[in-house]
Image: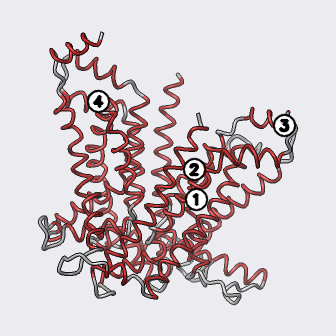
Amino acid sequence: MAETAAELARTRPRPVPLTWLGVVPFMLFALMFLIVPATLLMIGAFQDPQGNFTLQNIANLNQPTIIKAYRTSIAISAASAFGGALIGFGIAYAVALGHVPRWIRPTMMTFSGVASNFAGVPLAFAFMATLGRTGLVTALLTSIFGINIYRYGFNLLSFGGLTLTYLYFQIPLMILIMTPAIDGLKREWREASAILGASTWQYWRMVAFPILWPSLLGAFLLLFANAFGAIATAYALTGSSLNIITILLFAQIRGDVLHDPNLGYALALGMILITGLSNGAYIWLRSRSERWMR
Amino acid sequence: MKRPVIGPWITIILGTLYFLVPLIATFEFSLRMKRGVYSFEAYRVVFGDPNFQASFTYSAVIAIAAILVGVLIVVPTAYIVQLKLPRLRPLVEFITLLPLVIPAIVLVFGYLRMYNSSSWLPLTNSVRGTDFLLTCAYVTLALPYMYRAVDTGLRAIDIRTLTEAAQSLGSSWPRILFQVILPNVRVAVLSGAFLTFAIVIGEFTMASLLNRPAFGPYLQLIGANRAYEPAALAIIAFIITWACMGLIQLFGGGRQRAARR
């Protein structure tokens, strides 16, 4: 058997080089527009302007402005990812298992597809028209309930306002990710636990949650990275007044505000590390959770 | 097994409110340009603005170019990986996920370092070169979605049988790819294409940092200087996104119906 196969291989040589040739354009593209540009930045983070190796750029990240920008970015991303994950999970659960009419689910999924892609500059406009100083909801709250939210310290151009705005694409993304995972909870598991005398709480704590947690945590990390790399919404909403890392890097690229391009590379390296870690953990967790989704 | 269904309803209603209120508020705001009456004045101003037309056309052209380049790169790769080189799958999938890992602003920063005027390939020196760079940047941004769509499409058809049938009839490789495989995954390619369009059309960061007159930077400029036009533009952008997603559903739904028949 092995001999005949070996003979076949010898008599009819496979056109292996031609096959490999087919993936060359893709690999070349990936090298030119993904791998080499990112690698160059990472190398630049460890070079001085003359091109010598140095750790000074990394050390220079230890400035109040930069530390604060990273902090604010991480806080906004974590807050919007946590809120988005919680609310998105609630809606996904209600849609998948909440005994609601059948038409709600496809409607919600389509809408989530749209809303999760409705980000960037237009999203900022929408929230300014809604919760800005002259926005409709602000005006309605003032005229109907006599509550001027701005007098109570609310500001759309702040941490809370930006988090609320980011939720507009975070929640739908969570719905899109979690609905299939919730579908993976088999009815039999619930029935089996009920037959064994488990309460609803016990079912959730000991069956459903242990199965769902990799998806949940993974989705949280994906949402986190999603918000962390975002800039257009924040920039259109606040101009450059809010000190988050993407806006700082944007200003750095535009006008070299830090007066040191290599420090910019170090900024970028920090961002790649943070999104890389959270995305890497997401991919790992997803491969764990997929064991239960068959 | 009747359980109270009030909780799910409250969740869904609150969620729906959160999504609809900003849209309603934005629409209402966009109608208020003329004092005292509701009118579509803001939309008239926006559509009449030559910069709107120019920037939108520019972004649409770049988006279409990005879709074409993306299809040309992704379809042969996904096909070969599935048929001949399954060993490469982990590597290729890892590469296609990278644009989600590296933020767009970092990528474009890398381009500016790699392709600046004093580099080995000074793409940013000329307008056409920068347009090309922006197109490739958008191909990169859309790569995760395009690859996933095409890969799923290829799994749904029997590419091995199709390829062998075409080979036994004497087809050349380009012909197999473009006249046999591509038509069979056109639904997947189209959904990848519409998703690409939705992502690219209002993209701000890359276009702005490469200094190209695209729709995203135009939106930002209007937002910084006008009151009512931004609201109208937000509604227009929402309709464009909705149209792209609707078209994906339409084609996808058509395929499901055909499969059931």
Which of the 4 image quarters holds residue B173?
top left
Could you tell me how far apart the alpha carbons at marks 3 and 4 are, in whole angstroms? 49 Å
Q: Position of residue A243 (x, y in %)?
A: 47, 83
* Residue position for label 3: A194
Residue A176's label in the rendered image is 2
Same subunit, labels 2 and 3: the answer reads yes
Q: Label 1 sits on what residue type?
A: Phe
* Residue position for label 4: B84
Residue at the location (65% across, 84% down)?
A154
Relative height, residue B132 to residue A3 (above, below): below
Q: Position of residue A115 (x, y in %)?
A: 55, 58
Which circle's residue, 2 or 1, is located before the other in the chain? Answer: 2
CB atoms of marks 2 and 3 within 8 Å? no
Question: What SS does tag 3 mark?
Answer: helix
Which circle's residue, 3 or 1, is located before the other in the chain? Answer: 3
> In which chain is the residue bearing label 4?
B
Q: Is residue B31 visible?
A: no
* Residue position for label 1: A220
Question: What SS does tag 2 mark?
Answer: helix
Residue B163's label in the rendered image is none
Residue at the location (46% across, 44% down)?
B248
Q: Label 2 sits on what residue type?
A: Leu
